[in-house]
Every structure is written in C-alpha cells, then in structure tokens.
Image (cartoon, rainbow, N blue to C red):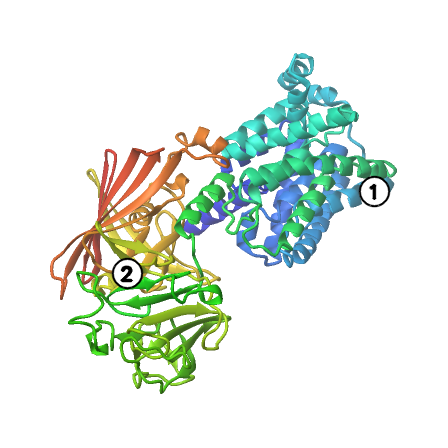
C-alpha cells in the first residue's frame, strides 16, 4: 500500500515539476495553475500531459536518476515540444506517432546537451526543445498525413468550435478593453511561454508566479518593460512583441539571471536589465535568418544570452565578485537570498579547513595582526600569545627569570590535524631582555594541514619538542612547550598561518576557529574569526555529556514520544548521509531533512528541508548552533534565514524589496542554564530562542528547552505561541 502511494506521489511530482521547471520552480501550486492553463485548449492540454508522461517514462525505463525525473528535469522540454506540436497539427494517429518520435528526439538531445554543458557548470535550459521542435517542423513539411492546425491563426474559431464560449468572451474582452498596451503584450507574452496566445493565460500564470516568488514576479514585469521601452526608444516595430510573442524571452531571462542562477541583488537586477538591449538586437537578427526557412526563433535569444553570461561569470578570477552564483539551489529566489544573507553573517570568515588556537586555557594576545613590534609587512598576519594574571601581569615576582613568566613551559598544541613538515631545534632560551637575532624564530615547528596551508609555532623551549618530522598529529596533541628562544626578549608563543613549508614564510591572512573571548559580560563565542590585540581568549574544552549527546553518526536512530495538548504521537529519526557525504537527520514520519556539521567542538545545522510543523523543524531551530561545552554565562548568537521563522504572509511584501533592503531579521540565541556537577555531570539543561525582529523590535519568538543526560537528549520542549510540545526520547 505504501509502495503504491509512493509511486503515485512520484508520478504527480514528476508531472507538476515538468511544468514548474519552465519557471525555475518546484512550487506545486504554480504547477497546478500552469497545467490548468494548458487546458484552455483541451486537446493541447492532453498533448502536453502525454508528452510529459512519455518523456519521464523514457527516462525511467532507461534507468536515469529518479530524483531528476521527479524534479521534472527530463519532462519540461518534452512538455514544450508537445504543446508546440499540439498547436501546429491536428490530432490523429499520425500525430500520435510523430509525438512519440518527437519525445525520443527531445530526450536524446536533453541527455547529450546536458552532458556537454554540465562540464562547464552550465544549464541546458530549453535547448532540447528548440532542436526538437525545429527538426519536427522542418521534417513534417513532407509528411502528407500531418494536417496543419489553425489554432494559431483562427484562435477564436477554435475556441468557439470547442465549446469554450466563456473563453471566447474573455478573450474578446481583453482584446477590446482599454488595458494599456505594455500590460496586454506582457500578459500575452507570458501566456505564449505555454503556447497560449491570450492575455487570460498570462493572468493565470502571473498569479501563479506571484504566489511562488515575489522576486521572480517583479523581475518578469521589469525585464519586459525594459525591453518594451527599448523597442520604443530605438524606433523598432513594437508590434513584433505582440504578434510574434517573443516577449517571453525577456521575461524568462530576467527571472533566470535576476533571481534563479544568481543570488538576487542590486547587481543581478542591473545585469539582467543591461542584457535586455543585447537580447533585443540578437532577437531581431536571428528572426531575420529564421524567417528565410519560415521557423520561429522561440526561446533561442533567451538561451544564448543566459548561457553565455553564466559562462562568462565562470571565467572570473575573483571569487567574491558580483553578481554571485547560487551554490545550493533551493528553487526559490527568496530562499536562495535569505540563505545567502544568513550565511554572510554566520560564515563571514569561514574556511573549509579549521585552524584552532595552539594552547590550553586562557591567553592574552600581546601582539596581533599588523602589530607595533615585529608583525610587519610580509609577516603582519601573526599572533603573539602570553598568559596573564588578574592584574594582567605576565609574570610573578619581579619577572627577572624565565620561570617567573606564567606561559613559560606551558604546553603547545597542534592547532589542527596535519603532518610535521619542518622542525628547528637546539636553540638556547634567552635570558629575560636578551634576543637572538641570528636565529630569529628560535625553536620552531611547521605543520602541514593541506594544500598550501601550514601553521608555524615559534620561540619554543629548548629540548621541549615532542614530535619528529613526518609524524602525523591530531588537533589538540601536545607538540612542545612555550620558551624564550630566538628573537624573544620575554617568553611568549608566536603563531602564524602560511602557504609554504619554510620557517619564516610569508604569513597568510587566515582566521582561527572555535575559541572564546573573555569580556565584562562573560564569554563570547567566535566561529572563524581573528583574535584582536589585548583580547583574552580561551580554548574550548568540550564536555563529555554534550559531545556524546550530539554524536550523530549515520545509522543512529532516535524515537520520540511527542505530546501536544491531549494528543500523543511517535516520531522516528535516523542519521543518514548523501552521495556527497553531507550528513542529515531524516524524519520517517514527515520526510523532513536537517543537514548538520559536527567538527568535534561545535554542532551546527546548515539547511532544513521539509514541513515547518514537524518536530525535526523545531529541533533544527532549537539546536541551530551548539557549542559542545558548558560555560555560564555564555550566550551563542547567530542568524537564521528569514523564511525559516517569518510566516509567508508576514514576509510577502518584504520579499519584493529584500534584494535591496531588509527590515525583517531572524535571530538565534542559546543559553547554558544548569549543570548538576562540574566534574562529573549527569544532567545539563540548555535553552534557546528563535526570534523574528522588525528592525530591532521582537515580533515573534519560539522558545526551546533541552535536557541532556548520559543517555543523550532525553527531553525537548517547545513553546510556539499558544502551542506547547513536549518530546521525550524513548530508548
């Protein structure tokens, strides 16, 4: 029974997504509206559905990836070809045979073109449709059994003959009304995307587009208007936009470049508009060529401009240049934008390879980047660390001896996993106030962590180095002790990141990961950041109870009894990983997925897919970022993507201006509440909040509480307005 239901859902999804893919969407409501629009002409609607079924059936029978079939990747070009053929030819046995052949050609071209363009990170768009429809239209001129349809010529007669009197009346109303010309041509151009050459179809599609994405909707209008008024400006025949229906090229290119393939921003809007004049000229040029063989240009200008522009962007050398490509496609311009805005704040200095601090406990940054003493020029991106007491003194007594300094002899740690690359040993420690300018770096260790990524610790204590060249070390391993060798008038630890394996190499501007900064309010957490001079920073010592509770490995299962009001249900979760080794929690009840990372010190979620009324959604929000330690007072703060917190109706208007300005924000806070025993804890409680802000005022919040014991997360409470949920883990 479950298998039959899954097959039905798969078939429905693959059908609807074949329609929504035309507008770069997976919104099922939009899919229903698009599907209904094609049935303004029942015959054409049936042809479209048949074309999708044949296309997806071919992909399924030949063993292609089911996820791509479900997403409509193989169906939408077939749909366009089917609708086009349904417009041009009369139904009959010959037409059905030709339709099957056309779907086979479309599928073959889809696979071939996608294989070529994917190597360059480029989409194939509607190129398969163009090749297939041109091939069929040219070849069918010699097929005597194919009868030409008059739908495109005598539309009113076709509608009247089909009994669609209301459509005739609506069509005539649009045609005789005083609707401004740009609006009327925009609507007919929008309808023409589905071979529906009437304004009513455009209205339905526009409504669906608006419900799907405010950004896409606004770009469809603005891009068309830029094209329309450019036609007026250059004195071109404005009627060509109306009778040839080529206006949809400008609509689709605006959506594609302004909001889908690129993160919506001022830059993407500007570029999508700037490319319109080029597309106008290109459209006019190719129209002249294609008119010689009596073929329409269809979506050729859109395909050429979008693919060439994306290819050009792929050749850029500056990775942070604007406009910015979408890295993880969520099939919603708003979601893509809000994810990027959140990640920009959350991962400001993020690097894939994490480098930690090379010591235990609390240390003061005595010299930071571009310091006043030695961190200059090519060596400016380095830190000097010392240990101080409550009065910020580095030594006890008068500080006349090396041993008086608190940091002298303290352990030096490997800041990340790696291999010992270079060692310099045998340099004598200086007396206080003396320096060794001939052996500047003193006793030093260089560790290789990856391609062009090394760290160097210097001024180590003579005879304290505990590793050998070529030895593999793990983050936190003790490798030496702090000394006073080299150019060091007093004991301190010099630390730098560099690209090359040589001692004294040019420093690399690289952040440190997962450390605490001590301030007047307690401790603040830093995730990939740069310790400032005179800051007191602290290495994070993980808590066994916390690390065990958030030790999520593939195959691990959770079972919760969820109580809400008088009802009680059971929820099952499982830790899984995808083909890219991204780990996620999967809910077997709701189908939701919550992707996460655990680096041994910090657990944090990166992406949520699924229903917002599921327990997994609330867990994702509650444990969005959890430091696997216990410090009180310690507050973790970061930012959610807005769409996770703000309801659809709240951000509806905000979406229109979000690429330029945001007045709504979604913030995450986590507090460590209690621990029953500092040395041997058996229970820890933490609390967190999801907060939606209108400018700086709180407009909505969801509160969470978690209880953690030796068995893991045992209790999870949610308060969302009047809704209260209590989930107990069943072991």
**Above/below status of 557 relative to 718:** below
Q: How many marks?
A: 2
* In the displayed structure image, the side of residue 240 where residue 571 appears, left or right: left
Q: Quadrant of residue 559?
A: bottom left
In this rendered view, identify the residue nearer to me: 178 or 527: 527
| Nearest to the observer: residue 620 or residue 437 | 437
**Looking at the picture, does residue 484 appear above or below residue 704?**
below
Q: Is residue 556 visible?
A: no
Closest to the camera, between mark 1 and mark 2, is 2
655 with respect to 390 (left or right): right
Query: Percent position (x, y) of residue 578?
Result: 45, 60
Give the CA separation, mark 1 to mark 2. Answer: 73 Å
Picture disc at residue 138: 1
Which of the pair 45/337 is nearer the observer? 337
Residue at 73%, 48% (x, y): give it: 101
Identify the residue shown where x is 49% and y is 44%: 336
Position of residue 705 measured from the top left corner of the image (x, y, whole percent): 21, 47
Quadrant showing the C terminus? bottom left
Q: Residue at x 78, y 43 (%)?
A: 134
Q: Which residue is mark 2?
A: 537
Neighbour class for label 2 at 10 Å: few (<14), some, many (≥20)?
many
* Residue 176 at x, y percent in the picture: 69, 12
Q: Residues within 10 Å of mark 1 (few under 14, many from 20)?
A: few
In the displayed structure image, the side of residue 724 where residue 368 appears, left or right: right
Q: Secondary structure at mark 1?
A: helix
């Amino acid at each position: 029974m479950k298998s039959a239901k899954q097959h039905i859902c798969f078939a429905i999804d693959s059908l609807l997504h074949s329609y929504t893919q035309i507008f770069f969407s997976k919104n099922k409501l939009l899919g229903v509206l698009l599907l209904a629009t094609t049935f303004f002409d029942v015959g054409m609607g049936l042809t479209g559905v048949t074309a999708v079924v044949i296309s997806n059936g071919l992909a399924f029978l030949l063993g292609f990836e089911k996820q791509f079939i479900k997403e409509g990747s193989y169906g939408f070009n077939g749909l366009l070809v089917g609708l086009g053929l349904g417009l041009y030819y009369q139904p009959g046995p010959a037409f059905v045979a030709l339709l099957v052949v056309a779907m086979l050609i479309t599928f073959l071209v889809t696979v071939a073109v996608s294989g070529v363009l994917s190597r360059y990170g480029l989409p194939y768009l509607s190129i398969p449709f163009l090749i297939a429809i041109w091939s069929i239209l040219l070849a069918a001129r010699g097929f005597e059994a194919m009868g030409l349809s008059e739908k495109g010529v005598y539309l009113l007669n076709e509608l009247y003959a089909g009994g669609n009197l209301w459509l005739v009346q609506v069509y005539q109303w649009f045609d005789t009304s005083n609707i401004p010309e740009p609006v009327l041509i925009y609507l007919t151009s929008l309808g023409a995307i589905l071979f529906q050459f009437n304004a009513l179809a455009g209205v339905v599609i526009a409504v669906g587009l608006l419900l799907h994405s405010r950004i896409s909707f606004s770009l469809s209008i603005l891009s068309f208007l830029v094209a329309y008024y450019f036609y007026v400006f250059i004195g071109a025949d404005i009627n060509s936009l109306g009778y040839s229906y080529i206006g949809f090229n400008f609509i689709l290119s605006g959506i594609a470049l302004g909001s889908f393939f690129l993160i919506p921003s001022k830059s993407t809007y500007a570029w999508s508009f700037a490319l319109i004049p080029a597309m106008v000229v290109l459209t006019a040029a190719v129209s002249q060529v294609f008119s010689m063989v009596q073929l329409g240009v269809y979506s050729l200008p859109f395909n050429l401009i979008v693919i060439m522009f994306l290819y050009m962007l792929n050749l850029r050398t500056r990775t942070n240049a604007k406009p910015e490509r979408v890295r993880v496609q969520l099939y919603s311009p708003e979601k893509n934008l809000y994810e990027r805005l959140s990640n920009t704040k959350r991962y400001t200095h993020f690097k894939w390879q994490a480098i930690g601090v090379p010591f235990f406990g609390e240390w003061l940054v005595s010299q930071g980047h571009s310091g006043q003493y030695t961190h200059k020029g090519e060596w400016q991106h380095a830190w000097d660390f010392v240990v101080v007491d409550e009065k910020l003194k580095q030594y006890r007594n008068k500080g006349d001896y090396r041993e008086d300094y608190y940091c002298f002899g303290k352990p030096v740690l490997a800041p990340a996993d790696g291999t010992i690359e270079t060692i310099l040993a045998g340099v004598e420690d200086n007396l206080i106030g003396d320096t060794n300018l001939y052996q500047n770096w003193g006793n030093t260790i260089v560790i290789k962590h990856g391609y062009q990524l090394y760290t160097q610790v210097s001024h180590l204590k003579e005879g304290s180095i505990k590793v050998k060249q070529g030895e593999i070390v793990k983050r936190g391993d003790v490798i030496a002790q702090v000394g006073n060798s080299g150019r060091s008038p007093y004991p301190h630890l010099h630390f730098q990141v560099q690209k090359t394996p040589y001692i004294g190499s040019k420093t690399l501007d690289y952040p440190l990961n997962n450390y605490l900064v001590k301030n007047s309010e307690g401790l603040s957490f830093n995730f990939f950041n740069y310790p400032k001079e005179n800051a007191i920073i602290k290495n994070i010592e993980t808590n066994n109870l916390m690390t065990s509770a958030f030790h999520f490995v593939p195959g691990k299962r959770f079972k919760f009894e969820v109580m809400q009001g008088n009802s009680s249900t059971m929820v099952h979760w499982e830790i899984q990983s995808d083909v890219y080794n991204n780990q996620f929690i999967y809910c077997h009840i709701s189908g939701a997925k919550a992707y996460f990372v655990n680096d041994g010190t910090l657990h944090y979620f990166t992406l949520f897919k699924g229903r917002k009324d599921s327990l997994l959604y609330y867990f994702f929000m509650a444990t969005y970022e959890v430091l696997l330690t216990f410090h009180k007072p310690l507050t973790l703060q970061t930012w959610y993507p807005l769409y996770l917190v703000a309801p659809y109706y709240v951000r509806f208007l905000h979406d229109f201006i979000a690429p330029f300005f945001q007045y709504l924000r979604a913030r995450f806070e986590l507090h460590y509440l209690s621990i029953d025993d500092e040395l041997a804890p058996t229970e820890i409680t933490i609390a967190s909040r999801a907060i939606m802000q209108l400018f700086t005022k709180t407009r909505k919040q969801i509160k969470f509480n978690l209880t953690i014991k030796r068995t893991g997360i045992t209790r999870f409470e949610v308060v969302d307005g009047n809704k209260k949920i209590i989930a107990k883990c069943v072991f």
